[in-house]
Amino acid sequence: MKRRAVITGMGVVSSLGRDLNAFWQGLIEGRSGIAPLDRFDPEGLRNINAGQVREFSFEPAAFGLADAPDIATQFLLMAAREALIRAAIAPSEERDPGFGASFATNFGGANSWERYVAGLLVGEVPAAAFEEFAFGRAAEHTCAAFGIGGPCALLSVACASGGAALGVACDMIRLGEAQVALAVGYDALAPTPLSGLSVLRTMTDEMIRPFSADRSGTLFGEGAGALVIEDLEHARERGARPLAEVLGWAENNNAYHVTAPDQGGAGMTRVLRDAIADANIDPRTVDYVNAHGTGTQPHDPAEVQAVKNVLGERAREIPMSSIKAATGHMMGAAGAAEAIATVMAVNEGIVPPTVNYREPDPECDLDHVPNVAREATVGRAISISAGIGGNNSCVVLGALD
């Protein structure tokens, strides 16, 4: 019999603020953290606006480090620490074999890569910057800082990564490989990744408008989302309060196109159907969909069609919103942050809005919660993620019975 996996702590660093409270308050107030980039020169990009984390400070010594790691790793460590504090789990000096972790990123230490290349161009070899770019470096720092000694996974399946990391952490618990697992998605804005995304023309030249008829593309953001996943019995034994249960999850790849979803959202339909089957629930009991909702012309109607395919008439009875116009598309952190927003909706009875929505689209004809948050009873919810290269993931979350 599989063990039950519950969420007992969460932490967020985003363009809306440096912790969970700021993130959630910004969402339900309908604010956006998207503004002109100023950490580096955005000249030449299709759009100079992004969801940049601002007024951010980091103390290396607080995490047992002599020097500051890559900024993406800083976001990760700060979000992870908040999640563990909220779960009332203290860091251990000894590695705990019952404590696992699952990490997700698109670009790893991309800003360290920029420093490394800049050094090479002037005849220097900045070895420390090269080390911080390595994708496994952030996991190394995190496991050392918090005493994680159990199974460890590092995923990079484009923008489906954050949701998949949560699913992998869930499986660590359900299969008895760990009693506690940390799931974290993280990424930081950097010139090279943004240049590539700009060339792919997924980026709008104005403002991101998910599900709105006048949408023209997405805008990117940065930060980290961290969730503590725990065996239900272990949580109860130590007196922790579960925030939600991870009922099921799935991932796949539709192998259709570099950036566009396959026709009719077939890949997203399959991942949604598989996640609901893994959760062993009736799709008619789903109360809310936290959509991937990128604001690109091909993606949004395909995602809407996938939800209709699986939920049937229930799709027209429940809200389906996207938070990307508030935070920017957080890349490897997107699925984790969106899962956190979904858990908050379950706990607070409020669904976050789709901001910047202006014009109804006949192809996106569900309840997209335009611009204003809404009270709603959310017992079960799904969070969908999709990414470049046809990657899809989906997580089913619910209030504890």
Image (tube, rainbow, N blue to C red):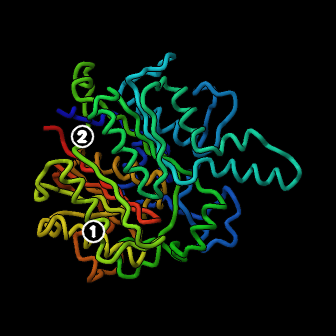
Q: Is mark 1 on a helix, strand or loop?
A: loop
Q: Which of 105 and 39 is in front in this view?
A: 105
Residue 300: x %, y % from top left: 35, 73
Residue, x 49% and y 51% (percent of image)?
Answer: 156
Q: CA–CA distance between discs 1 and 2? A: 23 Å
- When the figure is inspected, residue 227 is found, relative to residue 325, above or below; the finding is above
In depth, the one of 23 and 328 nearer the eye is: 328
Quadrant in which the N terminus appears: top left
Whether residue 42 is visible to the viewer of this picture, yes or no, is yes
Element marked by disc 2: strand
260 on left or right of 62: left
139 vs 193: above or below: above
Q: Which of marks 1 and 2 is in front?
A: 2
Mark found first going from the N terminus, 1 or 2:
2
Asked whether residue 374 appears in the rendered view, the answer is no
Q: Which mark is residue 368?
A: 1
> What quarter of the picture does the C terminus occupy?
top left
Q: In this view, does 103 lie to the left or right of 278?
A: right
Q: Residue furthest front?
A: 255
| Residue 244: assigned label | 2
Could you tell me the amino acid type at mark 1?
A: His
Q: Which amino acid does label 2 sit on?
A: Ala
Instruction: Name the one closer to the observer, 346 or 4.
Output: 4
Q: Which residue is drawn at 36% across and 34% down?
A: 228
Residue 11: where, in percent of width, then height? 42, 39
